[in-house]
Amino acid sequence: MRAVRSGARGEWKISRPRRRCTSVAGLRVSSHSASTASRFQRARAAFQSQRRERRSVQAVGARGPFSEAYRDRARGSAVSVERSPDAETAAAFAGSWNRQREGSVYTREQFLDWFTPLEPEAFSGKTVLELGFGNGSLLYHMAACQPARLSGVELGDTFERTKANLGEALASELDLHQADLTKVDLGPYDFVYCIGVLHHLKEPVEGFRAVLRHTRARGRFHCWVYAREGNAVIRYLVDPLRRVTSRLPWWLTKWAVALPAAAKYFLYAKLLRALAAVFGESLIGRLPLGAYSLWIAKRGFSFFHHVAFDQLVTPTTHYIDRATVERWLEDPAVDPDSRYVVFRNGNSWKFGGRTRS
């Protein structure tokens, strides 16, 4: 594996040596794709074995080719990354992601919920691209769906943490690129997804156009964004605070602000979950942030703290209404018969479809 410069814009990517390409079921894929699914499974098994043996993933890869390639890529990409209008936001999130424990932040149940109405079978044997992969938490679960090829783009400096989260064996199977997702061009994929990223861009619509640009003809795309609807508490109470905390040192935001805020919301969500057992979820879900609270209450306090820190550390957050989502889906590249919009947990939108042939 090596670091190479991608295109005229100076983006860098972690890349394997090129392999001969063949045609499988009408798709142009690399000759190793037929065995990729089993290799993903072996890689995941190897990573889980490492964790059981209490071996440090960071130490395993500290002197390996990924580490050397990453250092070279990081030095060479500094200028192009800093020129991005979203560089400040990417740096803030990198600070958050790089302080997470190894493994995926999300459970398998959360992963599947984010992608509903799509089923895991929709990704099997496909070429898949994630725009804005953070610390690889979704890549970790997507790999289990056995795609033919799995790629990711991330503007932030999170590659070492991603390697640790995925395990070196699994990370070596992926094509990871550090670049501005609104400007990079990696060619078409069968399935492109962008979860929790568009609403943090200076120009969210440019991010959506990048999703469509990377989706092949008749390919699928899927996105998730914060909704304007159902988020009055966040918009009027939390967002004004975010404008201040995003300018503070990360450690002050995380421990002096996010921690007590997470503790209060943790108690609120757990209380609603207990009340729902008595009065029913349909009734309790009508309370402020009710549906979302019932969903997140399944997780422990560390996840609440992670979510609170994420909310408070970012310089840019948009809350996007349904009319805007529907306007995006009116893009001529989108097949109008394939479009869907789903209101998730009473405070966010899942949407997607297919591109035209």
Image (tube, helix red, strand yellow):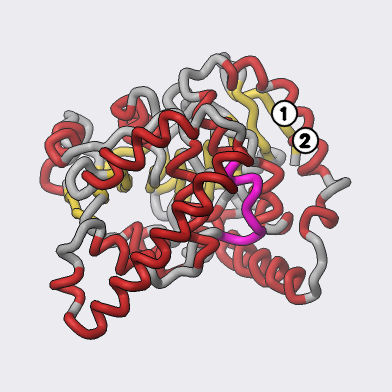
Over which residues does the magenta segment extend?
96-104
The percent position of residue 156, horizontal first and vertical second, equals: 58, 33
Magenta stretch prevailing secondary structure: loop
Task: Please tell me whether residue 243 is drawn above or below residue 277 in the rendered image.
Answer: above
The percent position of residue 256, horizontal first and vertical second, equals: 56, 45
Quadrant in the picture for residue 140: bottom right
Please state if 197 lies on the left or on the right of 168 as rendered: left
Q: Are marks 2 and 1 in contact (CB under 8 Å)?
A: yes
Task: Please tell me whether residue 324 is drawn above or below residue 79 in the rendered image.
Answer: below
Q: Residue at x 45, y 52 (%)?
A: 261
Tell me the element at label 1.
Answer: helix
Please state if 78 lies on the left or on the right of 327 as rendered: right
Task: Please state which amino acid type lies under the numbered disc 1.
Answer: Arg
Circle 1 residue: 73
Task: Please state which amino acid type lies under the numbered disc 2.
Answer: Ala
Circle 2 residue: 69
Magenta stretch: includes residue 231: no
